[in-house]
Image (tube, rainbow, N blue to C red):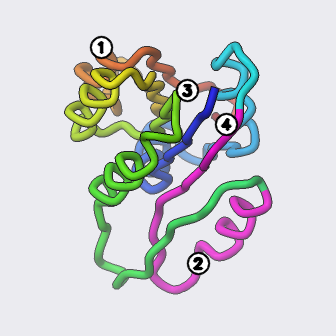
C-alpha cells in the first residue's frame, strides 16, 4: 500500500495545547502508528508536515521532523499571523493522488470533508488522525469523524500523543 502522510502540525499543536497543556506529539511514533493501522506492507510515498514560524523558533523542530523522514513545509509569517494551510495541503494531496492508495490526514478541520469525499469516490482510502476529544472541548468536528475509512483519535494523559 502506498501511503501519503499530510500533517497540519499547527492545527494539531493548537488543539493539543488547548486540551492538554504541556503535551507534545511524538512524530516518530505517529509514523509507526500509521504503519501499524495500515495492516499491510507499506511504502510511505510522502510525509509532509505543514506549519509556520515567526522568528525561526521552529528550526529545531523542523530539523527533528527531517530526521524522522518528514518533509517540513513551514512558512515564515509575521508574529501576529496564524495562516491556514488547508488549501496547500489539499493541493498537495490532489497532485499526488495517482501515486497513493491511502491518504493519512493529520487535521482536525472539517474543511477537508469535500476532499475526503472526492478521494473516497476515486478509490483512495482516507485515514484521519486527529488530536483529542474531551467532554469539555470538541477539537474534532463530528462530521469529520463520519466520513473517512478510518478515524483515529489520538490522545492520552502521559504528556505525549
Q: Which residue is mark 4?
A: 30
Residue 136 or residue 28, whichever sits in front = 28
Relative vertical location of residue 16 with respect to residue 40 in this rendering, above or below: below
Tell which tag, 2 or 1, sits nearer the viewer. Answer: 1
Which is closer to the viewer, label 2 or label 4? 4
Q: Residues within 10 Å of mark 2 (few under 14, many from 20)?
A: few
Is tag 4's residue or tag 1's residue first in the polypeptide sequence? Answer: 4
Dot placed on the residue nearer the N-terminal end, 3 or 2: 2
* Residue 149 appears in view: yes
Q: Secondary structure at mark 4?
A: helix
Decide which of 77, 93 is in the foreground and name it. 93
Badge 2 or badge 4: first in the primary sequence: 4
Q: Are the residues at dot 4 and dot 1 in contact (C-beta closer than 8 Å)? A: no
Cβ atoms under marks 3 and 2 closer than 8 Å: no
Mark drawn on residue 146: 1
Query: Residue 70 sits in which quadrant?
Result: bottom right
Residue for point 46% across, 16% down: 150
Please state the extent of the stretch shown in magenta in the rendering: 43-67
Q: Nearer the viewer, mark 1 or mark 3?
A: 1
Can you give x and y, in whole percent of width and height, for residue 36 in the image? 72, 20
Q: Going from the N terminus, do you reach mark 1 or mark 3 first?
A: 1
Amino acid at each position: 500500500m502506498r501511503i501519503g502522510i499530510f500533517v497540519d502540525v499547527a492545527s494539531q499543536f493548537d488543539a493539543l495545547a488547548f486540551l492538554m497543556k504541556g503535551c507534545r506529539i511524538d512524530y516518530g511514533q505517529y509514523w509507526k502508528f500509521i504503519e501499524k493501522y495500515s495492516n499491510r506492507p507499506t511504502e510511505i510515498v510522502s510525509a509532509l508536515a505543514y506549519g509556520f514560524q515567526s522568528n525561526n523558533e521552529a528550526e529545531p523542530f523542523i530539523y527533528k521532523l527531517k530526521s524522522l523522514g518528514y518533509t517540513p513545509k513551514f512558512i515564515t509569517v509575521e508574529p501576529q499571523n496564524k495562516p491556514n494551510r488547508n488549501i496547500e495541503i489539499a493541493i498537495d494531496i490532489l497532485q499526488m493522488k495517482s501515486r497513493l492508495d491511502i491518504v493519512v490526514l493529520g487535521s482536525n478541520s472539517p474543511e477537508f470533508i469535500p476532499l475526503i469525499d472526492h478521494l473516497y469516490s476515486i478509490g483512495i482510502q482516507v485515514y484521519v488522525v486527529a488530536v483529542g476529544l474531551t467532554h469539555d472541548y470538541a477539537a474534532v468536528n463530528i462530521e469529520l469523524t463520519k466520513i473517512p475509512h478510518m478515524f483515529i483519535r489520538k490522545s492520552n494523559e502521559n504528556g505525549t500523543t
